[in-house]
Image: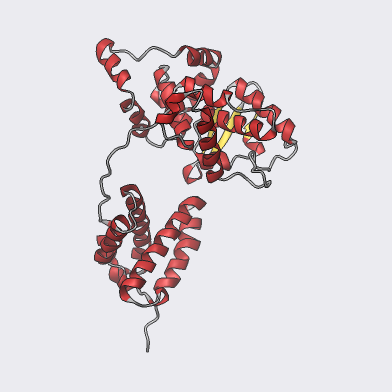
Amino acid sequence: MKQENKLMPLVQSFFQEYLLTHRGLSQNTVVSYRDTLKLFFAFESSRQNKPAIKLTLEDLTADIVLAFLNQIECKRHNSILTRNSRLAALRTFCLYLSTKDTLRIGEYQKIIALPLKRAPRKVMNYLTIDEVNSILENIDRKEFIGQRDYVLLKLLYNTGARVQEICDLKVNSITFGHMPVVTIIGKGNKTRHVPIWSETATLLQNYLKITQLSEQQNSHLFMNLRGLPISRFGIRYIIKQRSLSTERNCPSLKQKTIGPHTFRHTIAMHFLQAGVDLSIIKSWLGHINLATTHAYVEIDMEMKRKALAVCSPVGKSPSLKKLLDKNKDVLTWLSSLSNH
């Protein structure tokens, strides 16, 4: 009797049951895993000159995975970070297979044990307070599109949210009152509550009135011109265009590559330079490990120099200090959350 090919049914259950139901991963992570397996199967199909549907579990070996990783790095010119991301997806797939196909568990363990490749560490890019203000002040807020972009960038800076987290925000994600708060659903569907400054809250209230979204609590907060929820690529485009149009008034922007994550790095650095405790910044950004937040300390060489000289943090930026002084209760409240 012909042996049944179990690979494709296991691929299907990996996505439908394991990733979504058991692991509860985000849609973006699932899509990344899907793309990885599509690339891997296309590579192996081409290598063996047979349709992908006819690939079997025996075609998944550590040597073949290494050949695939070499191909995407050398021929597709993927970065080391992308290569590592592909390997991570394949390791997760093999971890799942090891529970379903115990006869080949040794081969799956070899793939799981493949090490990630060390990548050169890039210097994080962030903006000065003057550069942030220049970008915001250059936006013409007379038109609706300008109003939307201004509020979007202000909220991106205030919250330090990831771009997808901003895309996913709905009207009911904002709670106004004495302590205005944005409820953010982050990586792994983890929820965090990020307080916003009164200036940002006022902007959001006016924005909701202009867009008539106040009564549409389940509507996405930011829409594109077609009336659809704004995408990561849409926000990236907005930031690029707004930054380019500001370069004449702020030449230092020409030396920087600016994207959505730049604003996340920016608020973290500004807090750090203003003397805000790392544990508070960790809670603000939604980092799992304090070590991730600590990476910001490594960025500012001027901070290192001053720390060595006087063993104390750099002086507070006057404009941010004024903002922090006005919102001491916000930082105190967030600090109390980090102790639980």
Q: Nearer the viewer, residue 185 or 164?
A: 164
Q: Is residue 228 above or below residue 175?
A: below
Q: Is residue 39 above or below residue 150?
A: below
Residue ID at (64%, 32%): 146
Query: What is the count of numbered marks?
Result: 0
Is 220 left, or right, of 113 in this rendering?
A: right
Q: Nearer the viewer, residue 264 or 226?
A: 226
| Horizontal and vertical percent position of residue 49 | 34, 77
Is residue 104 in sight in this rendering? yes
| Horizontal and vertical percent position of residue 325 | 52, 12
Is 117 left, or right, of 282 in this rendering?
A: left
Is 26 left, or right, of 309 in this rendering?
A: right
| Horizontal and vertical percent position of residue 137 | 58, 23
| Horizontal and vertical percent position of residue 182 | 58, 32
Residue ID at (32%, 51%): 84
Is residue 25 in sight in this rendering? no
Quarter of the view holding residue 142: top right
Q: Is residue 7 above or below residue 306?
A: below
Q: Is residue 20 above or below residue 149?
A: below
Residue ID at (29%, 38%): 121
Q: Nearer the viewer, residue 199 or 325?
A: 199
Residue ID at (28%, 44%): 119
